Each structure stands twice: as C-alpha cells, then as structure tokens.
Image (cartoon, grey):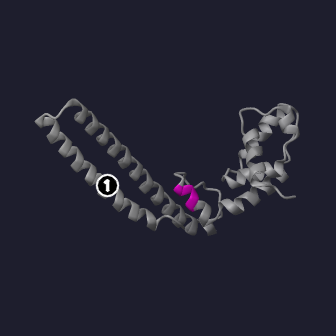
Amino acid sequence: MKITLVTAFAATAILASCGLSEKKCTKGDWAAIGKADGLRGAASDQVVKYIKSCSKHDISVDQSAWAMGRDEGLKTYCTPQSAYNQGRNGHRLKNVCPDADLDAMSAAHEKGRKYHDIVSQIDDLKRERHDLRHEISQLIGAGGTPESLARIGQLRSQILHIDLRINHLQLQKRRFDQL
C-alpha cells in the first residue's frame, strides 16, 4: 500500500483535531496516520490520544498499523537532512530517533539552526533599515532645518552600517545554506 505524503498529512490534520468524530475514528487509515506522525517526529504516546478520543465512540484504534506507519515515517524524520530542515525552520529536534543517528543529526540540526539564526538577523536588520528610511522620509517632508539635515545624515550613516552588516551576514548564510 503506497501512502502519499499529502494523504498522510491530511489524515493527521484531521485526527489531531480536538476530538475525533465517530466517522473519523471508523474511517481512520491508521498506517497513514502513523506515517504522518512519524514524519513529523511524533512521540510514541501520540496513539494514546487517538485511543482516548476514539474510545468515546467505542471504536478501537489499530495500534499495530499506526506503529508500523510511524516507524516508516521515522525513517525519513531520523535523517541528517530532516534534522537540518528542522533547524533551518526554527524547530527543535525531537527525541524520537535511535541513538546511533544522533551525532550526525545533531550536527546537521546545528547547521540548520545557524542558517535560521542568520536569516532572522538579516530580517531584523531589514526591518530596522526600513524604519530608518521611513524616519528620513518624514524628516524630508517636514522641511530642511539644520537639525533635521544633521539627523538625516546620521540615519543614512546608520543605514550604510546596516547594509554592510546585511552583506556580511549574507556571505555567512551561504556557508549554512545546504547540508
């Protein structure tokens, strides 16, 4: 049985909602749900939430199918590339993988986290630059007093400094751009 990523994520989105309806519990593709949970690094106790919700409707969860699906999903989650992507997206690495994989995964996650941090710094600097440019526009619109002209000069100097920092960070970002 081939489970597409979209199907697996859709199944998890449906079942991860607050309470499961009887229909959702009955029609649950537990292998697909398990695989989606594994792909996102869900803990093994995730199935307990499904059991609790479905038991309200006197419906049992196919725990074996869910566990096999989760194991299949974890094969993708527990890779250096996935760990890098988690760090790059600002997510922490979940403790669900075999110890044998942890060193490579931790190094990859750290590289992704550094990329994320640099991108965040660049975004902050761009916002700061935007605010400074806005202040310059307001000063220009208010007239050219000696004080406002001096302030405009200071703001332009700050913008140049920010541009240099952004360029430096852009160069650093390239080192962490890929695993």
Instruction: Write the residue at 55% across / 68% down.
Output: 103
Left or right: where does residue 100 sit relative to residue 174? right
Q: Nearer the viewer, residue 143 or 177?
A: 143
Above or below, 106 against 32 in this view is below
* Amino acid type at image mark 1: Asp
Give the image quarter of residue 55: top right
Q: Position of residue 108 (x, y in %)?
A: 54, 65
Instruction: Write the residue at 52% across / 57% down.
Output: 88
Give the image quarter of residue 140: top left
Instruction: Write the residue at 80% across / 57% down.
Output: 68
Q: Which residue is disc 1 drawn over?
A: 163
Q: Position of residue 105 (x, y in %)?
A: 57, 65
Residue 134 counted in the magenta span: no
Give the image quarter of residue 164: bottom left
Left or right: where does residue 131 sit relative to residue 112? left
Q: Nearer the viewer, residue 53 or 127?
A: 127
What residue span does the magenta drawing correspond to?
A: 84-88
Q: Quadrant of the N terminus?
A: bottom right
Q: Under tag 1, what secondary structure?
A: helix
Left or right: where does residue 108 sit relative to residue 62? left
> How many numbered markers are drawn?
1
Q: Position of residue 8 (x, y in %)?
A: 76, 50
